[in-house]
């Protein structure tokens, strides 16, 4: 999978240094210490236009920090599932997200004084559309074991990092971004246990 991602990135960027030492260097694709001005997605297919018939759309967000912008609300509309990697910091925002789609969420370091219900804990593992998701606010606290998609937040910096049979995703922050890319979220399409596409969505 990693080699196919390298080829995709090479084609997208058209520059060898992005593959060898920049985007896919020793730290991986947009590691937490990199200032990613753009994020290349992963598409599993020959054509740029994917056949997504029957696919489920999983929208991934984190670090909303008490503010659901109109742009974020509009982007989330139509999602089959929302995954939130913590720092919601608003019970009313959490309730609003639940009116859009089912929500799977974890607690962030600023969420301890809020009550989102007993299912929102520090870590989460669940299976959806045949894929096993592991979610934690901190990357270093992600659940161990057989995980297909690992989701984290906290850094406010978007990351898509293929790691063997697993892909790490940090959607960045739609509220307080820390890269020149601005506010972001992530979107994943899945069908029958396969990731069809995964990309960072700009929100400006």
Image: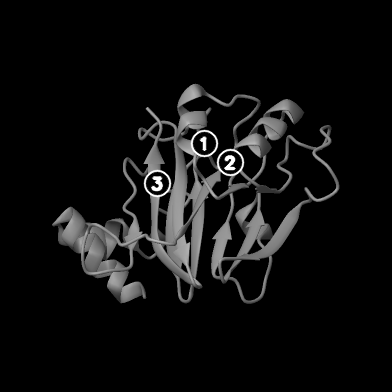
User: Which residue is at a point 79% across and 50% down the rendered structure image?
Assistant: 121
Left or right of residue 177, residue 117 in this image = right
Q: Where is 40 relative to 96, above or below? A: below
The numbered disc on residue 173 is: 1
User: Which residue is at a point 58% across and 41% down the rendered structure image?
Assistant: 62
Q: Secondary structure at mark 3?
A: strand
Q: Could you say which is closer to the camera, residue 171 or residue 197?
A: 197
The quadrant in which the N terminus is found is bottom left
Q: Quadrant of residue 196?
A: bottom left
Query: Residue 99, percent across and down?
Result: 65, 35
Query: Which residue position is annotated with label 2?
Result: 62
Q: Marks 1 and 3: in contact by CB < 8 Å?
A: no
Query: Residue 163, percent across and down?
Result: 46, 70
Query: Residue 155, percent across and down?
Result: 55, 42
> Which callout, 2 or 3, points at the residue further toward the start of the chain?
2
Q: Marks 3 and 2: in contact by CB < 8 Å?
A: no
Disc 3/disc 1 C-alpha distance (Å): 11 Å
Q: Could you say which is closer to the camera, residue 25 or residue 156?
A: 156
> Which callout, 3 or 1, points at the residue further toward the start of the chain?
1
Query: Which residue position is annotated with label 3?
Result: 200
């Amino acid at each position: 999978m990693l080699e196919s991602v390298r080829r995709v990135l090479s084609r997208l960027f058209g520059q060898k240094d992005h593959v060898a030492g920049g985007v896919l260097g020793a730290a991986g694709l947009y590691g937490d210490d990199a200032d990613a001005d753009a994020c290349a997605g992963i598409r599993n297919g020959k054509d740029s236009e994917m056949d997504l018939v029957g696919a489920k759309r999983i929208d991934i967000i984190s670090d909303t920090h008490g503010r659901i912008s109109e742009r974020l609300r509009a982007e989330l509309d139509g999602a089959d599932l929302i995954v939130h990697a913590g720092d919601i910091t608003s019970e009313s925002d959490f309730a609003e997200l639940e009116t859009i789609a089912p929500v799977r969420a974890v607690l962030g370091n600023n969420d301890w004084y809020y009550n989102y219900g007993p299912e929102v804990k520090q870590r989460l593992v669940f299976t959806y559309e045949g894929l096993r998701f592991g979610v934690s606010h901190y990357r270093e606290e992600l659940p161990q074991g057989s995980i297909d998609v690992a989701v984290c937040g906290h850094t406010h910096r978007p990351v898509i990092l293929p790691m063997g049979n697993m892909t790490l995703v940090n959607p960045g922050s739609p509220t307080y971004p820390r890269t020149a890319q601005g506010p972001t979220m992530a979107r994943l399409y899945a069908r029958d246990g396969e990731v069809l596409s995964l990309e960072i969505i700009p929100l400006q």
